[in-house]
Image: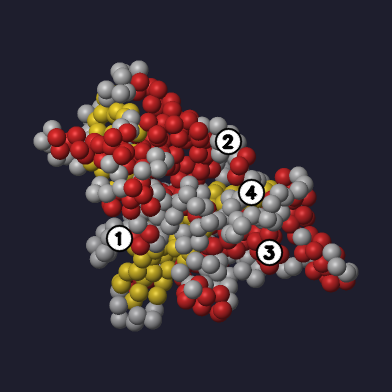
Amino acid sequence: MRKTFVLDTNVLLHDPAALTRFEDNHILIPIEVVEEIDRFKRDPAEKGRNARQVSRLLDGLRTQGNLADGVANGDQGGTLKVVFCRSETLSQLPPELKGGNGDNNILAVALEEQRLQAVMGSQPPVILVTKDTNLRIKADAVGLIAQDYTSDRVDIGDLYPGFCELWVSAEQMDQVKHPPGLAVEGLVVESPLLANEGVTLVNRLQPAHTLLARFNAKTSTLQPLQRAPKAKLGRIQPRNREQTFALDLLLDPDIQLVTLVGKAGTGKTLLALAAGLHQVADERLYERLLVTRPVISLGKEIGFLPGDLEEKMGPWMQPIIDNLDYLLGGAGEEEGRSGRGGSHHRGTRSNWTDLKGMGLLEVEAISYIRGRSIPRQYMVVDEAQNLTPHEVKTIVTRVGEGTKIVLTGDPYQIDNPYVDAESNGLTWLVERFKGQYLAGHVTLLRGERSELAELAANLL
């Protein structure tokens, strides 16, 4: 039975292509939604771009007929119609909902459609689709079916971890160490291994004996980690199994996209920067280290930031500066200690400025990355959980020949009010790219920042 979906504005602003994702069902667009789309179209940010795209899609459908009567939507038999809110239906809402605001008008449209279906004797479901939690509550209160828009949501509990565990014999474990590796055919695995998935091999007879390997999908073999055990990164060494898997992916130039997910203190950013600096400054595999992160604050904004782009980005990049100082041994600290007041500030920033002066480090605002082509660079996108799927797509499609891109973030620490743990661009990217030859992913589990930070991350 075909369903009728009434779409809220926030669904179309989140995903303009939502108009095409309801297959052979009927879509109703309240005129209030068209009005709100019109108000958003001048916004210079992503919401404005999405609003303009929705307007173009609707205008294209308009050429097929009268939107008020309904037009064909796609090749699967679906239809789309723009409908008005009838004042008599609005008057039948509970007294608290008769204000005539946008949400109530959309509710009235859905209720009117439900009433018309009942009059005609057909009972296909009428479903209000909205990302507004309160509107879904209102719809339920007045007897409507309401759903969230879930086409791009990822169940965070089922997020691909990037590694697994296999129990093998001592002979099989020894076979991994010698070319061409251990063939996975015949091994007992809970689910098929994915390209570049980390595997912990456990000796059946001696469980304390383990070996870390990675699945090579091209040869269908397990091979030992090649790069992480040999890495010379100064004071940085992997402290647990997941960090070892992550570092091996970060140091492999054949893996062009790496995603690292984990709670605070698991070493996501530090590992990404350490591997990047090593490959830029020591191995010369890339021309420079390009660092960017969303400009979204944890709390209330403190106001306008003066200065040029570099000065404005300074406060947002302070976590990166701290990590670089740790990686490079606090170069310039003696200068900071020898002076007074602001001299310490100049000392702690010397690593940052020195790397930029040598052309090894570049800072880019995500706002200005559209349209760029970025070849032969090691690119780190920090706090990527605050990006939308569209923004992540925009960033990854900037990658040019010879560039490696690393996205890090914690889906449980989201400051962007328009995404959540299951709809953000980072988890969306993990699910879309799992199993691809050019990509690798690791979920870091154990915090290594400090005992207190780990306890806070687990308890609070």
Asked whether disc 4 touches disc 1, contact meaning CB atoms under 8 Å apart, the reply is no
Report the residue that reaches farthest toward the left. Answer: 121
For disc 1, the neighbor class at 10 Å (few under 14, some 14 to 19, many from 20) is some
Amino acid on which disc 2 is placed: Pro
Cα–Cα gap, marks 3 and 4 = 16 Å
Asked whether disc 2 touches disc 4, contact meaning CB atoms under 8 Å apart, the reply is no
Amino acid on which disc 4 is placed: Leu
**As displayed, is residue 357 above or below residue 52?**
below
Which numbered marker is on residue 322?
Answer: 3
For disc 3, the neighbor class at 10 Å (few under 14, some 14 to 19, many from 20) is some
Which numbered marker is on residue 323?
Answer: none
Cα–Cα gap, marks 2 and 4 = 25 Å
Q: Visible in this render: residue 431?
A: no
Mark 4, secondary structure of its residue = strand
Q: Say which residue label 2 marks.
A: 44
For disc 4, the neighbor class at 10 Å (few under 14, some 14 to 19, many from 20) is some
Q: Say which residue label 1 marks.
A: 184
Mark 1, secondary structure of its residue = loop
Q: Residue at x 55, y 48 (%)?
A: 404
Earlier residue among tags 1 and 2: 2
Earlier residue among tags 1 and 3: 1
Q: Quadrant for residue 190, please give it.
A: bottom left
Amino acid on which disc 1 is placed: Val
